[in-house]
Amino acid sequence: MDVSKQCRSLGIYPAEQVAFARALQVGMHLFGRNRCWPLDKRSHPAFAGFSTSHKTTLLYKGLDARPLLLALSGRFQGEGEVAIRKAVCKSPYCLNPSHYYWGTRAQVALERRASEKKSISLEVVKALRTGRQEGKRVLDLARTYKVPYHTARRICAGETFENLNETKQERSPESIWETLRTICDELVDRYPEEAREYNLAIHVAAQLECPWHRKGLPGHKGNFGMQGECLDCMEELKNGRCSVDVTNFDLTWYWQVKRFWDQVDIRGEDECWQWQGATRKNGTESLAYFPSPFHSGKTQSASRVAFWLSRGYTGKYRVFARPTCLKFCCNPKHLHIREFEDHIEPLTIGEVKLNHGNIFEHYRDSDFQAQSSVTD
């Protein structure tokens, strides 16, 4: 069967097929064949279509990425089968095609228990069934082989592991990688216009800057995660960065940043800072103008922008205030992102600086220092 037709049957069309194939080519270059390709820990513009929002499965354009991985490596076997990860795989968001294969639901259950190092194996399954045929009680068998009673009962009744006697034919790694390389090249060659547009999009993404980027200085450019977060900001956020200082930003951002903080009622460090600007939906949502390359709209919630401009640019991640906060609180010490449990909360806010004596002189000095550091 035509691989392109297989992909279309899974809901993936030419432009997305090209992007998926390119992502695998980049993965082979970055990670190699034998390692896991954990997309929750590595960033590259080629992986923009993937999502790690699901707890156990890597998604692509909102769909399960596993059947697509197998289709592009020539191992798609149609409906009624389940793609599962091998026990050697270390990440639920692994993109390595050789770490997946088609298996029956029985093989899925057996593989999962093997990866969890639980005391069930093919030999135990056979022993349970043999013991039951000999007239032994399921409860006694479950205790003997240290298997949960309900699992033992289902095994003895033939409801699970029903196809364990079938041998699953696994292709060699060399064959998988050769097929993958061939199919990816064919897809890219088949859709030249989609490939051209994809290459252009990747080039543009590599030039994107986060608000904290300063001209003439390295960092905060073309280094974004899968949720659009600036990975340079993430490192500084882990160190507890928290600053309300308009001079941290390039002159092109200065007035926009200042305009935002001018609409916030800045009070004591431990008090709520309420948003005084625009709202919508009968005053139930705050509305702050702040364009983002990773959002279709040009407005964000005030709390999200406050987090971006005080702690770091975190893209599409949602920002929450404390349950006890006043409505539309923008105090950086009161804001958090639920996914960032390992990040350090700020102990204090740096000096609040919403203006600068002569901003043009300030930026001239900053640009001169940046150019000098680059020259040195």
Image (spheres, rainbow, N blue to C red):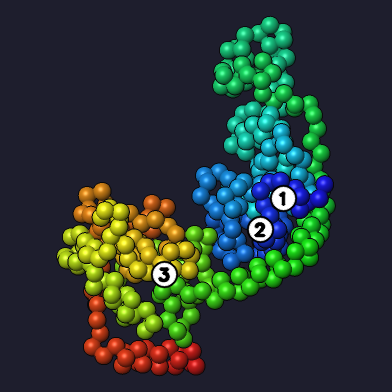
Q: Position of residue 335 (x, y in %)?
A: 30, 58
Disc 1 versus disc 3: distance between alpha carbons? 34 Å
| Crowd around label 3: few <14 · some 14–19 · many ≥20 (10 Å) | few
Q: Position of residue 120 (x, y in %)?
A: 64, 28
- Does any portion of residue 248 appear in the rendered image? no
Q: Are marks 3 and 2 in contact (CB under 8 Å)?
A: no
Query: What's the residue at 78%, 63% (across, down)?
Result: 190
Disc 1 versus disc 2: distance between alpha carbons? 9 Å
The residue nearer to you, when weighing 214 against 111, is 214
Q: Are marks 1 and 2 in contact (CB under 8 Å)?
A: yes
Give the residue number, with chain letter if any, for mark 3.
291
Q: Amino acid at mark 2?
A: Glu
| Crowd around label 2: few <14 · some 14–19 · many ≥20 (10 Å) | some
Disc 3 versus disc 2: distance between alpha carbons? 26 Å
Disc 3 is placed on an element classified as loop
Q: Position of residue 202 (x, y in %)?
A: 61, 70
**Which numbered disc covers residue 16?**
2
Disc 2 is placed on an element classified as helix
Disc 1 is placed on an element classified as helix
Q: Are marks 1 and 3 in contact (CB under 8 Å)?
A: no
From the viewer's perspective, is 246 left or right of 373? left
Q: Quadrant of residue 312?
A: bottom left
The residue nearer to you, when weighing 167 against 82, is 82
Dot 1 or dot 3, earlier in sequence: 1
In the rendered view, would you say 262 is above or below 141?
below
